[in-house]
Each structure stands twice: as structure tokens, then as C-alpha cells.
Image (cartoon, helix red, strand yellow):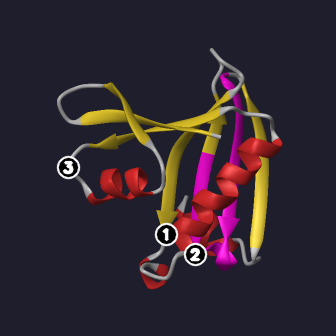
């Protein structure tokens, strides 16, 4: 991922892959300073799984994470998805950040992780 973030020098890139386990999308913003990845759920093709979000240190605290999430939600809607979900560590900044962005606690994965979902 560091290679992608360092070498994509465009304002917005959406990359689409077909893998043996399904489809994935990478959204890269702000000349490579941020990236979010989403996979289409193989068990339910109307769900998208956010598998990662990354913002470089120099771009933090400037709203890039918000923009990445907004672009991902827009793409998910354009693809006809009804829900996006992710896994986050409870009692962490990112867990609370996703809740502020409209995600709700869904399933308990283990004593440290929860699945968070958002209807689109």
C-alpha cells in the first residue's frame, strides 16, 4: 500500500480488481495521501466491506478521512449496494469516528472487535 500511496500522483483514482474471492475497489485521493479499500461481499452482493483506510501523517486532521469515506459511500451507492460494513477495535478512536459517521455497532467479533454497519 505504501507503494501505491507514494506513486499515484492524481487527485482521485478509482481502481477496480476482480480477484478469485470477488471484486475490490481502491479509492486514492489527494495525490496519494489517502486510500480506502472496499470489497463486494461474496455472500451478499448488495453489501460492501471496507477493508482498510489509510491517510499519510502529513494529511491527517485535514478532513481527508471524511472525504475518503464519502467517496466510498458514493461508489457503493453507484454500484447499487444497500449496506457497507467494517470491523473496528472497540474503545479506539477509529471505532468512535465510524460511529460519528453513521455506522452502528452490529456484531461482536471477539472481545476486542466489532462489526459496524451503515445502511445506504
Whole-percent x and y of residue 92? 24, 54
Whole-percent x and y of residue 75? 75, 49
Q: Which mark is residue 55?
A: 1
Q: What is the count of numbered marks?
A: 3
Whole-percent x and y of residue 49? 57, 36
Residue 106 found in image quarter: top left
Q: What stretch is highlighted in magenta?
A: 21-37
Marks 3 and 1, how far apart at CA? 20 Å
Marks 2 and 3, how far apart at CA? 26 Å
Residue labelled with disc 3 = 91
Marks 1 and 2, how far apart at CA? 6 Å
Pointer 1 and pointer 2: residues touching (CB < 8 Å)? yes
Of marks 2 and 3, the one in the foreground: 3
Q: Which of 8 and 90 is in front in this view?
A: 90
Q: Residue 33 carries which label?
A: 2
Q: Please give left or right for residue 13 compared with residue 59 in the image.
A: right
Amino acid at each position: 500500500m505504501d507503494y501505491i500511496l507514494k506513486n499515484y500522483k492524481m487527485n482521485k483514482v478509482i481502481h477496480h480488481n476482480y480477484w478469485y474471492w470477488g471484486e475490490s475497489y481502491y479509492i486514492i485521493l489527494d495525490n496519494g495521501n489517502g486510500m480506502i479499500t472496499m470489497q463486494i461481499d461474496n455472500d451478499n452482493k448488495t453489501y460492501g466491506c471496507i477493508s482498510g483506510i489509510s491517510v499519510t501523517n502529513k494529511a491527517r486532521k485535514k478532513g481527508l478521512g471524511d472525504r475518503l469515506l464519502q467517496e466510498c459511500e458514493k461508489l457503493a451507492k453507484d454500484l447499487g449496494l444497500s449496506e457497507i460494513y467494517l470491523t473496528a477495535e472497540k474503545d479506539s478512536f477509529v471505532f468512535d469516528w465510524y460511529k460519528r459517521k453513521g455506522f452502528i455497532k452490529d456484531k461482536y467479533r471477539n472481545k476486542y472487535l466489532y462489526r459496524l454497519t451503515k445502511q445506504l
